[in-house]
Image (cartoon, rainbow, N blue to C red):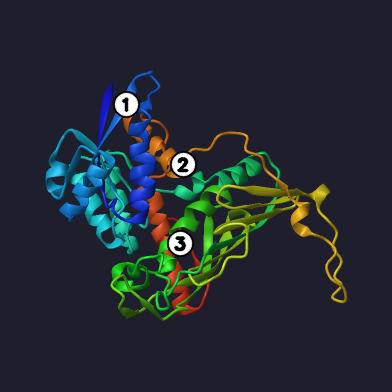
C-alpha cells in the first residue's frame, strides 16, 4: 500500500473539522484509502497542526489520529508529508501557503485565498513557477443539486440560457435574547477578514464561471443590517462590515445573473441556497441536493387577475430531477480529485488562479458598493 502524508491546518473550525477532517480525510482512512488507477491502495496519513496543543491532542484522541503538532515549521520540514492544506483564517492563508510552497509542498486550501487581489495573484504566480500542484476548494460545484443543473445544461435542456437567480442565506441569531449566534463573531469584523461580500462572491464567481458563463461585469450593493451582536464570550460588539449583499452580474453570452446573499434573512424557499435558471426551452431550480425542472411544453399559462385567489399551484407544475447516480460528500469528492491530481497527475481545473478570480470579484463587489456603479471584470494575467 502506498502512503500520502497530508498536513492539515485550521481543522478546529466548523468547516475544517466537519467537512475536511471528518467527512473527507478520516472518511478516506475509514474506507481503507483510495484505490488508484493502477489498482494499488493509497493510504491517507494526516497530521493535524494548530496553535492550541490541548485542542490538537483532544482532537487526535477523539478520532484516533496518530499525529498532531503545534510546530508548523517542523511539519513543513518533514519530507514524508506531501500536501499542505489550510482551512484557517483568511488573513493568514496567503502567508501560510507561501511558506508551504517554499517547503516544497503541494497546497490545497479553503477560500478566499486572500482579502487582497494582488496578494492572491502573486500567490498563484508563485505556485505556477514552483511546478507544484495547487488548488482551492470549489465545493458548491460538487453539490448534488448543482451537479443536476450541470447535467440539464449539458443535455441542452435549457435551450439558450437567459438568466440565473440565486438566493443564499439564513437568519444568524444576534445572541442577545437567549439563542446563541451560529456563526463566529469574526465574520462581522472587517479587520478579521469578515464580510459576506468577501466570503460569498468568491463562491459565486466559480459557480457562475463554471456553470453559466464567465463573469464580465458586476453591480453590488452591500449592507450591514444588524449593526450590533454578541460575541462568543457574551460581550456586545459593533459589526463594521457587510452582512448582506445584493449583486447583479453580466455573464458571457448575455446571461444575466442576480444573487442575493444575506445572514439577516428568514428562509421560505426550498433550501439555504437555491439557483433558478431560466432558458428559452426550460427552467430549473436547484438547492443543495434536489433539483426541479419545467420544460416549455409543461409550462402553465397564468393570467394576471388580482381580483381572485391564484388558481394554479405553481410548485406542482415542476418535476423533480431524479438521482441517477450516488453522490458522495462534495468536499470529499473534490479532495479525491486533488489527491489524484497530485499522485496520478489527473486533470484539475481549480488551481489558485481560480481562487484569485474569486478575490477579484469580491474586491470589485466592494468597490461597486462604495462607488455605487457597474464595474467590468477584466481577465487576470498569471
Which comes sooner in the sequence, label 1 or label 2?
1
Judge whether residue 160 can be spotted in this image.
yes
Secondary element at tag 2 = loop
- Please give the name of the residue rendered at 48% of the width and 62% of the height, measured from the top-left corner: 377
10 Å crowding of disc 3: few (<14), some (14-19), many (20+):
many
Q: Do the numbered discs 3 and 1 sit on residues whose CB atoms are within 8 Å? A: no
Which comes sooner in the sequence, label 2 or label 3?
3
Secondary element at tag 3 = helix
Label 1 belongs to which residue?
42
Q: Return the x and y of residue 4 as percentages of the image width and height.
A: 26, 31
Where on the picture, by quarter, is residue 114? bottom left
Secondary element at tag 1 = strand
Q: Nearer the viewer, mark 2 or mark 3?
A: 2
Q: How many marks?
A: 3
Q: How far apart, in angstroms, are the residues tagged by discs 2 and 3?
A: 20 Å
Label 2 belongs to which residue?
329
Label 3 belongs to which residue?
200
Q: Do the numbered discs 1 and 2 sit on residues whose CB atoms are within 8 Å? A: no
- Please give the name of the residue rendered at 50% of the width and 69% of the height, measured from the top-left corner: 171
Q: Return the x and y of residue 16 as percentages of the image width and height.
A: 34, 51
Residues 264 and 180: in front is: 180
238 over 323 or under it: above or below = below
On screen, residue 354 versus residue 313, left or right, reads: left
Amino acid at each position: 500500500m502506498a502512503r500520502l502524508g497530508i498536513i492539515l491546518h485550521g481543522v478546529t473550525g466548523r468547516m475544517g473539522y466537519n467537512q475536511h477532517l471528518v467527512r473527507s480525510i478520516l472518511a478516506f482512512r475509514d474506507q481503507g484509502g483510495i484505490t488508484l488507477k493502477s489498482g494499488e491502495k493509497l493510504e491517507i496519513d494526516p497530521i493535524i497542526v494548530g496553535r492550541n496543543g490541548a485542542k490538537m491532542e483532544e482532537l487526535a484522541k477523539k478520532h484516533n489520529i496518530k499525529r498532531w503538532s503545534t510546530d508548523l515549521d517542523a511539519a513543513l520540514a518533514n519530507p514524508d508529508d506531501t500536501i499542505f492544506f489550510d482551512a484557517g483564517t483568511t488573513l493568514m492563508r496567503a502567508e501560510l501557503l507561501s511558506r508551504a510552497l517554499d517547503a516544497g509542498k503541494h497546497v490545497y486550501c479553503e477560500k478566499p485565498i486572500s482579502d487582497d487581489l494582488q496578494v492572491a495573484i502573486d500567490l498563484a504566480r508563485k505556485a505556477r513557477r514552483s511546478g507544484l500542484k495547487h488548488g482551492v476548494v470549489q465545493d458548491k460545484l460538487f453539490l448534488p443539486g448543482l451537479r443536476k443543473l450541470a447535467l440539464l445544461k449539458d443535455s441542452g435542456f435549457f435551450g439558450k440560457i437567459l438568466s440565473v437567480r440565486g438566493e443564499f442565506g439564513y437568519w444568524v441569531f444576534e445572541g442577545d435574547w437567549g439563542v446563541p449566534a451560529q456563526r463566529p463573531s469574526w465574520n462581522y469584523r472587517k479587520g478579521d477578514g469578515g464580510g459576506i461580500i468577501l466570503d460569498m462572491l468568491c463562491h459565486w464567481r466559480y459557480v457562475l464561471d463554471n456553470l453559466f458563463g464567465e463573469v464580465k461585469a458586476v453591480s453590488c450593493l452591500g449592507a450591514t443590517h444588524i449593526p450590533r451582536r454578541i460575541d462568543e464570550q457574551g460581550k456586545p460588539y459593533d459589526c463594521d462590515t457587510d452582512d448582506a449583499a445584493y449583486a447583479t452580474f453580466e455573464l458571457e453570452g448575455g446571461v444575466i445573473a442576480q444573487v442575493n446573499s444575506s445572514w439577516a434573512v428568514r428562509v421560505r424557499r426550498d433550501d439555504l441556497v437555491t439557483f433558478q435558471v431560466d432558458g428559452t426551452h426550460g427552467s430549473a431550480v436547484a438547492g443543495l441536493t434536489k433539483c426541479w425542472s419545467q420544460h416549455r411544453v409543461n409550462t402553465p399559462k397564468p393570467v394576471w387577475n388580482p381580483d381572485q385567489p391564484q388558481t394554479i399551484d405553481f410548485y406542482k407544475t415542476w418535476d423533480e430531477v431524479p438521482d441517477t447516480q450516488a453522490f458522495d460528500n462534495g468536499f470529499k469528492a473534490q479532495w479525491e480529485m486533488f489527491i489524484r491530481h497530485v499522485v496520478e497527475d489527473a486533470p484539475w481545473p481549480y488551481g489558485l488562479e481560480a481562487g484569485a478570480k474569486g478575490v477579484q470579484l469580491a474586491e470589485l463587489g466592494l468597490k461597486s458598493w462604495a462607488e455605487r456603479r457597474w464595474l467590468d471584470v477584466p481577465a487576470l494575467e498569471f
